[in-house]
Amino acid sequence: MKVQILTTPGCSNCHVLEKMLEKLGIKYELIDVTEKPEYLEKYPIFTAPGLVIDEKLEFTGIPKIADLEKKFF
């Protein structure tokens, strides 16, 4: 399973999502969309973070922990 967090510099909500995934033991890759704007063309998010699972945008903003658990377990 490939997990990516679409982030922006100084995004506090992004850090919250990172901590949630770490608590669940999920490995992820951080993508700074200001450095890689092609990700915004593929995944048009209007608020960070965006959570991409296996090349599909699953969540924008901070999801509920229960919703994350449903996706991963």
Image (cartoon, helix red, strand yellow):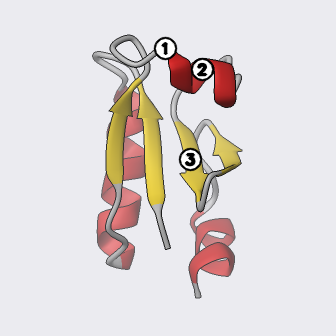
Whether residues under marks 1 and 2 lie with C-beta atoms below 8 angstroms apart, the answer is yes
The residue singled out by tag 2 in the image is 40
- Identify the residue at image location x=45%, y=49%: 4
- Residue 37's label in the rendered image is 1
- Quarter-of-image position of residue 50: top right
Give the foreground label among 2 and 3.
2
Tell me the distance, in whole angstroms, between the alpha carbons under discs 1 and 3: 16 Å
Q: Residue furthest bottom?
A: 73
Q: Residue at x 68, y 68 (%)?
A: 67
Classed neighbour count for the residue bearing mark 3: other residues with Cα under 10 Å, few (<14), some (14–19), many (≥20): many
Give the alpha-carbon distance from disc 1 to disc 2, as whole Å.
Answer: 5 Å
Total numbered badges shown on the rendered structure = 3
User: In terms of secondary structure, where does tag 2 sit?
Assistant: helix
Q: Amino acid at mark 2?
A: Leu
Of the residues shown, which amino acid type is indicated by label 3? Answer: Leu
Question: 26 or 19, which lies in front?
Answer: 26
Q: Quadrant of the C terminus?
A: bottom right
Q: Is residue 64 above or below residue 59?
A: below
Residue occupying the point 66% across, 74% down: 71
Q: Tags 1 and 3 in contact by the CB under 8 Å rule?
A: no
Vertical comparison of 8 with 58: above or below: above
**Could you say whether the residue bearing mark 1 is in a helix, strand or loop?**
loop
Q: Nearer the viewer, residue 68 or 52?
A: 52
Left or right position of 69 against 10: right
Image location of residue 8, percent across then percent down: 38, 19
Going from N to C along the chain, the mark reached first, 1 or 3, is 1
Would you say the residues marked 2 and 3 are in contact, meaning their CB atoms lie under 8 Å apart?
A: no
Mark 1 or 3, closer to the camera: 1
Q: Nearer the viewer, residue 1 or 45?
A: 1
Can you identify the residue that label 3 sits on?
A: 51
Q: Quadrant of residue 36?
A: top left
